Amino acid sequence: MISTWGIVASIAVLSGLAVADTCSTLKDISNIDVADPLELSYIDEQNEYWSTSCSALKPSCILFPKDADEVAAIVKVLNNNTENFAIKSGGHNPNNGWSSVQGGPLISTQKMKQVILDSETGIARVGPGQRLDSISAELQGTGWTFVGGRIGNTGVGGLILGGGLSYMSAQYGWSASSVLEYEIVLANGTIATASATQNPDLFKALKGGGNNFGIVTTYVLQLHPQGDVFGGNLVFLHSSETDAKLLKAVRDFTEYNDDDKAAVIVTAERGNIDLIDTWILFLFYDGPVVPEGIFKNFTDVGPLLDTTKVQTYASLMGGSNWVIVQGSVVQIGTETIPMPSAANGVKVMEGIHAHWRNMSDSVLLEPGIVASIAYQPFPKRIAQAARERGGDLIDADDEGHRLIIEMNYSFLPQSDYEKMDVTLQQTYGGVRERVLGWQQDGTLPDIYLPVFMNYGFHQQDYFARLRPENRAFAHAVSESVDPNGFFRTRIGGWKP
């Protein structure tokens, strides 16, 4: 059913009456919650970004629609002006302008937090305002879980639209692989359904295509059975010997682990003048009993601290937000690399890590600096599981194992954004240059290496790293559902 203010907005737009800015127009013709800059809800929402550089961008107002009809009304009003705008789920993506905006309206999804579960089938209708810790808490005790990411305050909306890498991806594919249906508001303000049988091209494009096609207001998800899990962190101090052992361990785990329930993230982290110089490992097993030897290559290195334990999945997600550095500017970039052979493991893994340490050496005097690099196994099984569930725009294959490398810099002065922007480009760019060289000389296999959207830097060209036919497909779908370029020209993000 279309709301009264949705109809009023449509009439106003069609008759040319809505000539004012979006904020004042919606105040005049609707009951949609509109928060101005001095209001508490505006201030609170602006503080809910991972990066302070996003919080520093000030929208003209923040809109809090509660359902698809209200989102449709907003889009129809926006169609009658030229304001740039943004849509925000959790605000975890630190790229300026992706879920933040200067001077135009921000559409917050925080009032669309529904989780409606069919306990028999495990199918749930989930709103984009949910975060991973909140949806895990709501599902606790139901026996079902969402294939989400690894940091609790990440928004469901951005995670799924970017693909979404999960501890459970070897079992179930990307987060997007579990989507059965999208409820989406298109560029002309109509509400549509995208599924395998309704608008199937749009359905595929939304799986890894980002925010180019509309505003998703409901995700219909196939959840999966969930009991207690084993998880937590191992902490090691940096040394050349420890570095070598952990880099070998993550390479070996990528190749030899054959238990889809097991997952690891191997992260090195440095702070100002090396007051922090550590490894922090994230271990996960989807069950309370870990088969003997699964994580032996890591535990045998001798951690300084071990927080792993059996716990609920909700507890694991709720306890993961400590990794968020509060009050800092955050920049994040990524590269995907082929897993090196055992014979070339030292050359590749230690070569990449030495490059990262050299780059992070150059910024250790930056106020508040925390530099990190995370090595995340991307085994063939993830690609297979994703394809078993219908495929996606990423279209990973099982020609070889891979690793996804995430590189982060967080720091305090916003005035240093451009300087650190260059440093991050040189960091992931150096990884890319080395990989291409190793592929050319035969050290690494020449396989498809897409960039993972959820970790991408604004300077990286996500769509150029997809298969050419999939980039063309995404562009064609965008042209079809948004012929006037409403989303292509007025919001941030990568464009096909």
Image (cartoon, grey):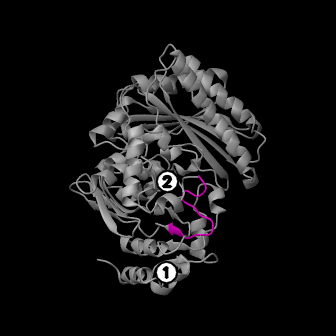
Amino acid type of disc 2?
Thr
Q: Which residue is mark 2?
A: 154
Mark 1 surroundings: few (<14), some (14-19) or many (≥20) residues within 10 A: many
Between 437 and 153, the one nearer to me in the picture: 437
Query: What is the x, y in percent for residue 207?
Result: 37, 49
Between disc 1 and disc 2, the foreground one is 1
Residue 312 appears in the rendering: no
Q: What is the spatial separation of the Cα atoms under label 1 and label 2, in whole angstroms?
A: 29 Å
Please indicate whether residue 17 sits to the left or right of residue 83 in the image.
Answer: left
- Which residue bears the numbered disc 1? 26
Examine the structure image and report whether residue 51 is included in the region drawn in magenta.
no
The secondary structure type at the circle numbered 2 is loop
For the residue labelled by badge 1, is the local secondary structure a helix, a strand or a loop? helix
The residue stretch that appears in magenta: 95-107
364 left or right of 455? right
Tell me: 153 left or right of 268: left
Q: Amino acid at mark 1?
A: Leu
| Residue found at the very far top of the displayed protein | 343
Indicate left or right for 411 with 68 as reference.
right
